[in-house]
Image: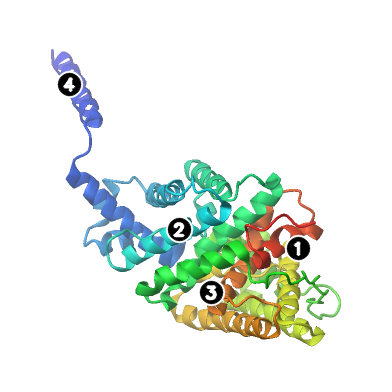
Amino acid sequence: MTMAVGDGASSGSQAEDAAAARRPPTRRYEAKRNAIVRSAVEEMNRKGVRGMTLGDVAARLDLVPTAVIYYFKNKEELAAAAFLKGLDAYHAMIAAHADAPTDAARLTAFIHAYFEHARLVAEGGADPLPVFNDVRALNSAEVNSAYVDMFRRFRGLLAGPDALPRPHGNARAHLLLSQVFWIAAWHYQVEPGDYARTAERMAAILTHGVVRKGAPWPEPRPLDLARRCEGAVSSSELFLRAATRLINEEGYHGASVERISARLNVSKGAFYHHNQTKDELVVACFERTFETMWRAIHAAERAGGTGLEVLVSTVSALIEHQMSGEAPLLRTSALTAVPAALRAGLVQRFNRISYRFASILCDGVADGSCAPVDVNVASQMISSAINAAAELHYWTPGMPPQTVVQHYVRPVFEGLASPAAG
């Protein structure tokens, strides 16, 4: 009898659970869940996927971590929900203007929609979008699939009657996606009331580029960016390369001492023999990146030519350097999770490089090789294109490195609505 009663109670409990699962969530439940996702986005944007903790997410809402676990089983599930919500927002912005008649019209409408959303976020009327810098670190099949779908939708913005072959279209779609994601790195310099004005200027550069109409395309001059060293590559350099690749792939928190050491098949003891701390190594990675970028700028300026020629040679050399895989540049996406004590100085160093790009653009406007564009916006877009080249191979497998200037660099300068080169 006791067993029979127990079986009946168990069956009743299971039936009640099943019925509860079928009931739609209440508005209160949805509101709390959305608040948790928003808090997670803010934490991820500051610390990256691996740096976010349920405790930090809960603390933003004056909750205990177990209250978050009621809605999400673990950090990974919460991060996936945050990314998926952001992807849905991008889908909606793209779909709203997908029927515009031209590439230029679709691009312009989308950029305006993005900045309008940013304005609403600044005024508290919309939730922030997640930064996708280290989305691969989550390793979620659902998120990865949704991200690829978003990439296709971005490519669709450029799919007019003269749509490019897939590898070339992918290169431009990756360039566009990277430009959009990079806005979060510099739009704080713009008053929210000026977002519409900035959107108009960015859209003009995206579609038409910075080359003055009718100006010939200058073939980039070869620049030597190699670091001078004697004999075999040093152990310190090997650590720099391993750390840079891992941070580019997994973000700051994903590049642990253990994982960096494992990349080189050495012990943690060997790591600490060459590096006092992980932060010291990360700063060294950034220092080498700055050094390489300045070396390219100075070499192009010594070679002479118009402002456009200097920029094209600089950008081409740096992107080809990125594509070579020998010693990649550290992506600035790592800055989102670098400790605050280090971040401000590193951001300033990057801004100085963008400032120099703006100065060279001014030279180009003065000598007639560049169109009279907003050089502040254009310089950030140039920095973004260089930065994003580290991931170009994911979207253009098999594209020969020697064609990267035609299919990736030229659209940076001639615009995404320009015809295919070569």
Q: Position of residue 357 (x, y in %)?
A: 63, 80
Q: What separation in Å lies between label 1 and label 4 (alpha carbons)? A: 67 Å
Q: Are marks 3 and 1 in contact (CB under 8 Å)?
A: no
* Mark in the foreground, 2 or 3: 3
Q: Position of residue 262 (x, y in %)?
A: 64, 59
- 213 to the left or right of 3: right
* Mark in the foreground, 4 or 2: 2
The residue beneath circle 4 is 12
Q: Around disc 3, counting alpha carbons within 10 Å, would you say few (fewer than 14), some (14 to 19), or many (20 or more)?
A: some
Q: What separation in Å lies between label 2 and label 3 (alpha carbons)? A: 28 Å
Q: Around disc 1, counting alpha carbons within 10 Å, would you say few (fewer than 14), some (14 to 19), or many (20 or more)?
A: many
Closer to the chain start, of discs 1 and 2, is 2
Q: Position of residue 173 (x, y in %)?
A: 60, 53
Amino acid of disc 4: Gly
The residue beneath circle 2 is 49
Going 62% across and 71% down the picture, which residue do you hit?
382
* Mark in the foreground, 1 or 4: 1
Closer to the chain start, of discs 2 and 3, is 2
Closer to the chain start, of discs 4 and 2, is 4
Q: Quadrant of residue 128?
A: bottom left
